[in-house]
Image (tube, rainbow, N blue to C red):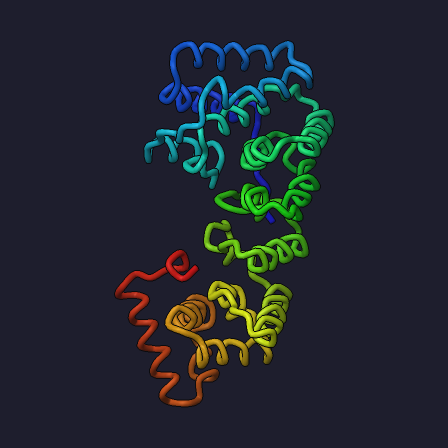
Amino acid sequence: MQTTTLGAAALEAIRGLFDDWISRSVTVPAMEWYRRTIEELRHVADATQLAMAIGTAPRRLGRSDLLLTAEDLERVRTLRPNFDPQYLSVDQLARIAFTVASYRGDDGAFASWFDKFCATAGINELIALCRGLPVYPAATLLEPRAREAVRSGMKPVFEAVVHYSPYPAEYFAEDAWNHMVVKAIFIGSSLWPIQSLDQRRNAHLARMLVDLALERWAAGRPVSAEVWRCVASHADAAGDAALVRAFETGGDKDQLAVALALQQGAEDRVDLLFEKPGLREKVRQLQSRLISERIGWEALA
């Protein structure tokens, strides 16, 4: 894992970007309230004041989408690599900004407040705070709370941590990462928005996903086509057999997914796995189609 630590200068620059983005979507009085609240939190805030600001943000600022440009995304990613704010709403971004503004240089105190607040937050507050994980200070100390959110039974909270965020790939150990991916499949959440999924594939994860696929087949239940993305490059004998079975018995999406997984992670094993000439030729045809039609994992989810 390679973690990212944001210094004071980067946090200040990010705060400036957030101010610019929010100003595009709110009224002048709303923006005045936002800026006044930020200054209060930076200098005289306590936990109660921060909680009040977070709770009030939607009513004062609204819930409209951010109006971001390609240049906005490029600028923020020079400060925080792989941060993806384009799916945030104005109130969510404000809640994240308020949380960052409350930081006083004490990592332990910040992490303690964050943990306590998340434990009692409403679902929309929790979603917003979890989506801010990539830009918070004391990121390492927030990892237990991030894992707790991933264990949540609420799919929107799970996806707030997992989707479009560099945080899990940077801070989750292999076991936590693997259980996160398996849970995504289990609850019907897509894998393609998970950053660094291919880089963090591993043999243990492949075995876990094959076991899940076998259980679902035995119960007569469908298996997500995205499973094979994390299996092909680390498949053992059972994994190889599952890939062939998925291709032989699956529909068009399943066959395309197996072909793409092999193309991206185990191209040299196609001839070994598919001994029947007809199947082997079918895999090659589908791989050509994947290229010509530019079909990726998002289309196969």
Residue 267 position in % (x across, y down): 42, 73
- On screen, residue 263 versus residue 204, left or right, reads left
Image-quadrant location for residue 99? top right
Residue 74 position in % (x across, y down): 38, 35
- On screen, residue 291 versus residue 209, left or right, reads left
Residue closest to the eye, 260 or 220: 220
Outermost residue, left direction? 292
Residue at image location 60% in from the left, 76% down from the top: 218
Residue closest to the eye, 19 or 221: 221
**254, above or below 22, in the image:** below
Residue 140 position in % (x across, y down): 66, 38
Q: Is residue 53 visible?
A: yes
Residue at image location 44% in from the left, 23% down from the top: 62
Q: How many marks?
A: 0
- On screen, residue 43 versus residue 297, left or right, reads right
Residue 24 position in % (x across, y down): 36, 21
Image-quadrant location for residue 54? top right
The quadrant in which the C terminus is found is: bottom left
Q: Is residue 2 visible?
A: no
Residue at image location 51% in from the left, 43% down from the top: 165
Outermost residue, front direction? 220
Residue at image location 42% in from the left, 9% down from the top: 29
**228, above or below 166, in the image:** below
Outermost residue, bottom direction? 276
